[in-house]
Image (cartoon, rainbow, N blue to C red):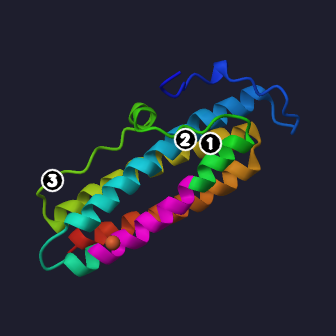
Amino acid sequence: MSTQDLDLSTQSTNSLNTGLSEDARASVVEHLNVILADHYLLMLKTHNYHWNVKGQLFKSMHDLTESQYDDMFEAIDEIAERIRALGYDAPGTFRAYSQLSNIEEAKMDISALEMAADLTNSHENLIRNMRKALDMADEAGDEVSVDLLTERLNVHEKAAWMLRSFNAS
Ligand SMILES: [Fe+2]
């Protein structure tokens, strides 16, 4: 198979006996796959703006984006490994990520303020998806995913606030 199969029903996870049903784990993983893809594509966009920002806000935007993509790089590994611990394969191709995520690609030749507004929207998009994932993990009784998602929600709400502040008066 050349592309990653995103159909979870084709993956057998019957050998796991951790107290979470296969249905519960699959429902959580379906959401975690989206969150992983969102993180990866938002990290790429953040990196793009880190490189291409110009003008008076260069230094502040260059530094803020660096701390944000560093954080997302570590989070991606944690989310992917949580998917593995729940018994499923972690998606890891750009084709899979573009199918799973609705994070828009970076725009070229925009100002630092437009970059900040665009990144704010993407973080808010990810935050909305994480709330859905959190509800599902809670319903499934998956405390570890609830913990992970709560921590990520806190980080992204803070990131969105900092980025939003570039355009605040
Ligand atoms: Fe850099």
**Quarter where residue 12 is shown:** top right
Q: Of 14 and 157, which appears nearest the observer? A: 14
Image spot of residue 40 (x, y percent):
44, 49
Neighbourhood count class around disc 2 (C-alpha, 10 Å): few under 14, some 14–19, many 20 upward: few
Q: Report the residue at 50% width, 39% height from top.
A: 34
> Which mark's residue is nearer the viewer, 2 or 3?
3
List the residue tagged with mark 2: 132
List the residue tagged with mark 1: 135
CB at disc 1 and ligand 1 closer than 8 Å: no
**Quarter where residue 94 is shown:** top left
CB at disc 2 and ligand 1 closer than 8 Å: no
Above or below: residue 93 compared with residue 116: above
Left or right of residue 72, residue 43 in this image: left
Q: Of 112 and 121, which appears nearest the observer? A: 112
Neighbourhood count class around disc 3 (C-alpha, 10 Å): few under 14, some 14–19, many 20 upward: few
Image spot of residue 63 (x, y percent):
33, 77
Q: Secondary structure at mark 1?
A: helix
Image spot of residue 165 (x, y percent):
29, 72
Q: Amino acid at mark 2?
A: Lys
Q: Report the residue at 42% width, 64% height from top.
A: 69
Image spot of residue 25 (x, y percent):
72, 34
Q: Is residue 123 visible?
A: no
Q: Secondary structure at mark 3?
A: loop
List the residue tagged with mark 3: 108
Picture quarter with the C terminus: bottom left
